[in-house]
Amino acid sequence: MAEEVNIPYKKENIIKCLCPTCPVQEHSTCAKEKMMNYQDLLQSEDDPKPEEYPGMYCTNGKAVCKDLDTEKNCICNECMVYKEFELENAQPNFLFCGNGKLKNRIFSFLISCFLYF
Ligand code: SF4
Ligand code: SF4
């Protein structure tokens, strides 16, 4: 059994996203170029378009930038969005930039039951 999870793509979540500081994007020229407009995007009245912001892959899906190093460690599990939406139980639950957006979340109590028995 699983439940659908929809994380709002909004500035209040975008500012919590750790993707721009992730080692996977550290040497990405494409991500760095997108981040040059970050302050402008935040000051705009509208939420940024997904292709304008190199992050929130958990809800936007795979990265548009193709120069990411997905062999490095994903830091999603340190993110407040990840904790708030309990993404440790999601499928997939890390490296959303490479694996694609989360599809659903397995009920945590079912996991607890499984681990208990
Ligand atoms: S989804 Fe994970 S691996 Fe990809 S950029 Fe964000 S924190 Fe890094
Ligand atoms: S869980 Fe990962 S992709 Fe989603 S907002 Fe946090 S750091 Fe970004």
Image (cartoon, rainbow, N blue to C red):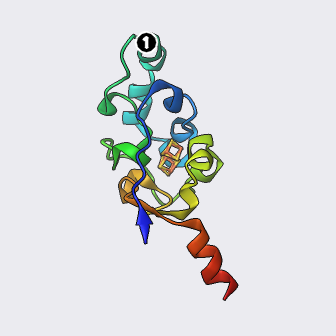
Residue at horizontal 58 percent and vertical 54 percent from the top: 86
Q: Nearer the viewer, residue 72 or 102?
A: 102
Q: Nearer the viewer, residue 46 or 95?
A: 46
Q: Ligand 2 near label 1 (Cβ, under 8 Å)?
A: no
Amino acid carrying label 1: it is: Asp
Q: Is residue 72 above or below residue 106?
A: above
Along the horizontal axis of the image, is 79 left or right of 66?
A: right
Q: Is residue 74 above or below residue 43?
A: below
Q: Quadrant of the N terminus?
A: bottom left
Residue at horizontal 65 percent and vertical 75 percent from the top: 112
Total number of numbered discs in the rendering = 1
Give residue 89's position: percent from left, percent from top: 54, 63
Q: Nearer the viewer, residue 12 or 63?
A: 12
- Residue 116, by quadrant, is bottom right
Give residue 47's position: percent from left, percent from top: 38, 22
- Residue 35, by quadrant, is top left
Q: Quadrant of the C terminus?
A: bottom right
Instruction: Tell me if mark 1 has few (under 14), some (14-19) or many (20+) residues whose alpha carbon lies within 10 angstroms of its own.
Output: few
Residue at horizontal 35 percent and vertical 55 percent from the top: 100
Give residue 82's position: percent from left, percent from top: 57, 48
Residue at horizontal 58 percent and vertical 33 percent from the top: 16
Q: Nearer the viewer, residue 22 or 91?
A: 91
Q: Residue furthest bottom?
A: 117
Tell me the SS state at disc 1: helix
Q: Residue furthest right?
A: 116
Q: Is residue 57 above or below residue 93?
A: above
Residue for badge 1: 40
Give residue 72's position: percent from left, percent from top: 54, 57
Along the horizontal axis of the image, is 45 left or right of 107?
A: left
